[in-house]
Image (cartoon, rainbow, N blue to C red):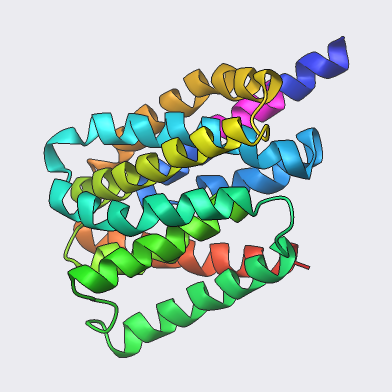
Amino acid sequence: MTHDLWLATAVAAACFATALLSAIAGFGGGVLLLPVFVAVFGARDAVAVLTVAQLASNGSRVWFNRDQVDRRLVAIFASGAVPAAAAGALLLSSAPLPALTRVIGVFLLAMVVWRRIRPAAARVGDRGFAVIGAGSGFGSALVGSVGPMVAPFFLARGLTRGAYIGTEAASAVVMHVTKLIVFGAAAVLTWRTGLIGLALAPAAAAGAWAGKKVLDRLPVDMFVVLVEIGLVVSGLLLLITGG
């Protein structure tokens, strides 16, 4: 019983810490939480639990930054993300997840270098942004979270701080809701995994609240550097854990 209590406390603390990080950088929580959840719940249940916990974390970030959300951009992103997230969720049981994880890791590192060489290169038009949404939705369904993958494209739209955090989080909420519907229909999401995810929701919301307090005090230049550092760390972590 004592072991289970310590384990539950450790998982909740990890959920809080990663939600705080996501509230500051806009991503990172899912990437860091997934290995923890895989170790505790197993690979199959980990993605379902992570989706519920991430829905709480992202939903909280949307609420705390609601006045700065770019709703038009969210709608464009969702036009590609929703069908792709549904397709990815259906393929969850048979996809080569380690290979995909490594590809995303390489992509993140390449995007940081590319942003430094050509800062405007990550900016795409509305159709291109819908394609980015499709890739993100599909990848998110397979590996739980690909927030770092889309960060350069949101930044290239000129979004910073609360506008970036809220808009990216709202886009993620759309994907997570879609995935949960499909997971439920495909029996990937069970009562057990759903309840575990809901039990972690308060920790995720508290982390998002604490992160918002930090975010409001960050200078814009420091914020962008912090995001790029997060991209590099996430990319390396995905390469290491993808094998």
Q: Residue at x 44, y 51 (%)?
A: 27
Is-magenta flag for residue 13?
Answer: yes
Q: Position of residue 41 (x, y in %)?
A: 77, 33
Q: Residue at x 17, y 44 (%)?
A: 69
Q: How many marks?
A: 0
Q: Nearer the viewer, residue 60 or 143?
A: 143
Q: Position of residue 182 (x, y in %)?
A: 54, 38
Q: Describe residue 93's horizontal placement relative to residue 226 as left or right.
A: right
Spot the residue most to the front: 185
Q: Describe residue 184's horizontal placement relative to residue 38 as left or right.
A: left
Picture quadrant of residue 45: top right
Is-magenta flag for residue 12?
Answer: yes
Q: Magenta span covers which residues?
A: 9-17
Q: Nearer the viewer, residue 168 or 72?
A: 72
Residue 68 visible, this orientation:
yes
Q: Describe residue 114's horizontal placement relative to residue 32 as left or right.
A: left
Q: Position of residue 173 (x, y in %)?
A: 37, 39
| Whether residue 162 is situated above or below residue 239 in the rendered picture | above
| Whether residue 107 is situated above or below residue 167 in the rendered picture | below
Q: Name the quadrant of the C terminus.
A: bottom right
Spot the residue most to the top: 1
Spot the residue most to the bottom: 117
Residue 70 visible, this orientation:
no
Q: Residue at x 80, y 39 (%)?
A: 42
Q: Residue at x 77, y 24 (%)?
A: 7
Dominant SS in magenta: helix
Q: Nearer the viewer, residue 197 or 130?
A: 130
Q: Name the quadrant of the N terminus.
A: top right
Q: Position of residue 131 (x, y in %)?
A: 34, 69
